[in-house]
Image: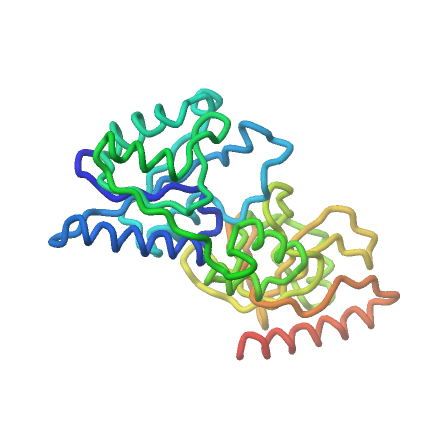
């Protein structure tokens, strides 16, 4: 990159309200540094998450794939998204090495905007104070923002905890968009088809933030952008003594879909109920009908 830009740095997992505030401030700083046209805004993110390299046992569950994150950052105001491949070598860089190699040499930063809790460099030794000193030496402006959200600050950690509890509607308010998983549809037990409610089955990825077991109202999103209303079950299917945790989506009023092998998005709007082990198929079918009716209500259909 040859043109100077205003840079914001973070993991940006989920791109929640706090991240959007940082990007909005970066755009304002870009406008103040050069009005016509404003400097571009560059969002720097890491892949994989640094903890996956430094301390894999403590790595957080992912809220978004890399391509979802890039799309969300662009929608939130980033002109460019610069993905740093985080490695063991990078983890050993001092804060000054990170500033010199990335912010100065590669990005030619004219300004930096970060959350006040952001840390970088070996042993997280770099902080907002370090950046301000570096800015004086290298000639870039620095703006640090307090965390949004009041008493309980917005964070990816908070969103993960809400999703783990099944509170997907509350999580969506912080994210400003519904939590969405992606996966390839695989062939399941086909019991849903036998019961009159065929489902698109996606295995639950253990590295991804999957909502608590239960039934949800939401949408299935196909690769062409088609959005299909769905009742979504998350769990092991205890009525039939299942073991594998799966996400099973019944697209309302559709028994003709063939989604095997297709990568779909599964968008969670609200939780309808917890997972239940039924004593008989008739009770299960009656409850699924209720789930479908409740899904229509939640989605406003």
Q: Is residue 192 visible?
A: yes
Q: Residue at x 88, y 65 (%)?
A: 279
Q: Residue at x 74, y 59 (%)?
A: 191
Task: Please give left or right for residue 78 compared with residue 94 in the image.
Answer: left
Image quadrant assignment for residue 230: bottom right
Task: Please give left or right for residue 186 compared with residue 63 in the image.
Answer: right
User: Seen from this angle, which residue lies furthest right?
Assistant: 279
Q: Nearer the viewer, residue 134 or 289?
A: 134
Q: Position of residue 168 (x, y in %)?
A: 59, 62
Task: Please give left or right for residue 209 compared with residue 265 in the image.
Answer: right
Total labels: the figure holds 0
Image quadrant assignment for residue 240: bottom right
Q: Check the image and report above or below for 91 versus 72.
A: above
Q: Check the image and report above or below for 248 versus 134.
A: below
Quadrant where the N terminus lies? top left
Image quadrant assignment for residue 208: top right
Q: Nearer the viewer, residue 40 or 120?
A: 120
Q: Residue at x 62, y 58 (%)?
A: 162
Q: Nearer the viewer, residue 131 or 290?
A: 131
Q: Position of residue 30 (x, y in %)?
A: 22, 50
Q: Position of residue 12 (x, y in %)?
A: 44, 46
Specify how the rendered protein is coloured: rainbow
Q: Check the image and report above or below for 51 versus 73.
A: above
Q: Residue at x 82, y 72 (%)?
A: 283
Q: Nearer the viewer, residue 118 or 296?
A: 118
Q: Position of residue 246 (x, y in %)?
A: 67, 51
Q: Is residue 182 visible?
A: no
């Amino acid at each position: 990159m040859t043109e100077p830009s205003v840079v914001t740095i973070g993991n940006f997992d989920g791109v929640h309200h706090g991240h959007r505030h940082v990007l909005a401030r970066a755009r304002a700083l870009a406008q103040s540094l050069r009005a016509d046209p404003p400097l571009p805004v560059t969002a720097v993110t890491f892949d994989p998450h640094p903890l996956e390299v430094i301390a894999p046992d403590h790595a957080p569950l992912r809220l978004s794939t890399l391509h979802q994150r890039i799309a969300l950052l662009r929608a939130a105001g980033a002109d460019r998204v610069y993905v740093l491949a985080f490695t063991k070598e990078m983890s050993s860089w001092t804060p000054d090495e990170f500033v010199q190699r990335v912010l100065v040499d590669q990005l030619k930063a004219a300004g930096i905007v970060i959350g006040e809790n952001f840390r970088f460099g070996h042993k997280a030794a770099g902080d907002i104070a370090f950046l301000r000193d570096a800015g004086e030496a290298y000639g870039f402006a620095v703006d640090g923002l307090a965390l949004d959200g009041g008493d309980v600050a917005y964070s990816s950690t908070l969103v993960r905890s809400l999703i783990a509890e099944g509170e997907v509607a509350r999580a969506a308010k912080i994210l400003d968009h519904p939590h969405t998983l992606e996966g390839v549809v695989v062939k399941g037990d086909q019991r849903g088809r036998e019961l009159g409610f065929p489902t698109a089955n996606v295995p639950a990825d253990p590295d991804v933030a999957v909502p608590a077991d239960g039934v949800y109202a939401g949408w299935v999103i196909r690769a062409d952008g088609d959005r299909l209303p769905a009742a979504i079950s998350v769990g092991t299917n205890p009525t039939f003594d299942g073991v594998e945790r799966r996400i099973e989506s019944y697209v309302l009023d559709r028994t003709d879909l063939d989604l095997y092998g297709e990568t779909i998005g599964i968008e969670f709007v609200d939780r309808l109920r917890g997972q239940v082990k039924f004593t008989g198929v008739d009770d299960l079918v009656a409850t699924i009908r209720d789930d479908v009716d409740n899904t229509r209500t939640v989605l406003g259909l």
